Amino acid sequence: MKFTEQLAGAWQKNDSLLCVGLDPDPAKFPAHLKDQPDAIFQFCAAIADATADLACAFKPQIAYFAARRAEDQLEALIAHIHEKHPGVPVILDAKRGDIGSTAEQYAIEAFERYQADAVTVNPYMGRDSVEPWLAYADKGVILLCRTSNPGGSDLQFQKVGAGGTVLYELVAEKVAKEWNTTGQCALVVGATFPGEIAKVRSIVGAMPLLVPGIGAQGGDIEATVKAGRTAAGTGLMINSSRAILYAGKGEDFASAARRVALETRAAINRWR
């Protein structure tokens, strides 16, 4: 099944636009997990099991695994989600961007080794650096457009055309009109910039948007949903990571995560 089909199914089945980010920091784990050799897997799998019926996607961030030599636990986690929670897609947050021959290897890593359903990609080396990802027509390719970090404006808001077009708008136009030939693309647009979410939505139509920045980063849920929802009330993967992951500090951490995920989904759905 294609990523976009999985995502549409999860939007409907789970009545959710919430994407649960999996950014495991062992320093924040409950005490009973800290000495376990597979603590990262145990922690993330418990979060996934507790929130799978509330989410439209999961988004593990590869750096949190690779920095601790836990790539095998990342593989196991994605396999676990696919087995236990089929229909909820897994987005590998890797933000890769390199020349074509290297991008081919990164695509093998993401889609064949880790079996991710989608991956985040940096488009700023141009179409030939993105084509190896697009070759996997059933996978999602989620391209950085207007990121949530304050420094994103250093480049993304620079004017690139005589008509006042800025760089993130050009990226949105390129992806929507030229690169999305198989309908597998999506864009990253941060919740900290609802005005830009609305602008991107006006450019790309119903293309899915991955929206980080609510929760710990302070993005406004109402403004995000109103700016980015489609006419059908979908079109968004609104990511929350730390606020859900570390809602509890004890052995009940997974139930605490579920409680916050429920609250977040309800807050999102209030404005759909």
Image (cartoon, grey):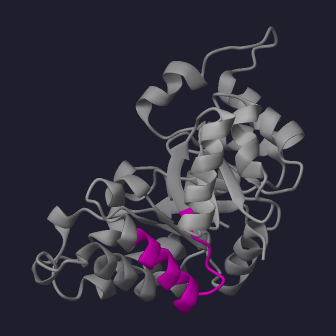
Q: Nearer the viewer, residue 108 or 34?
A: 108
Q: Check residue 59 for magenta coloring.
A: no
Residue 194 position (above or below residue 24): above
Location of the C terminus by quadrant is bottom right
Residue 60 position (above or below residue 36): above
Q: At x 60% / y 48%, what residue is drawn? A: 105
Q: At x 75% / y 37%, what residue is drawn? A: 172
Residue 259 visible (yes or no): no
Q: Position of residue 51 (x, y in %)?
A: 46, 83
| Left or right placement of residue 260 versus residue 92 in this view | left
Please tell me whether the stretch drawn in magenta is mainly helix, strand or loop.
Answer: helix
Q: At x 36% / y 76%, what residue is drawn? A: 44
The total of numbered circles placed on residues is 0
Q: Position of residue 233 (x, y in %)?
A: 75, 67
Q: Nearer the viewer, residue 12 or 26?
A: 26
Quarter of the view holding residue 252? bottom left
Quarter of the view holding residue 137? bottom right
Q: Check residue 75 for magenta coloring.
A: yes
Residue 236 position (above or below residue 38): above
Location of the N terminus by quadrant is bottom right
Q: Report the magenta residues as a range.
A: 74-91
Looking at this rendering, what residue extends furthest in the top direction? 162
Q: At x 76% / y 42%, what residue is drawn? A: 131
Q: Nearer the viewer, residue 82 or 200?
A: 82
Q: Position of residue 190 (x, y in %)?
A: 54, 44
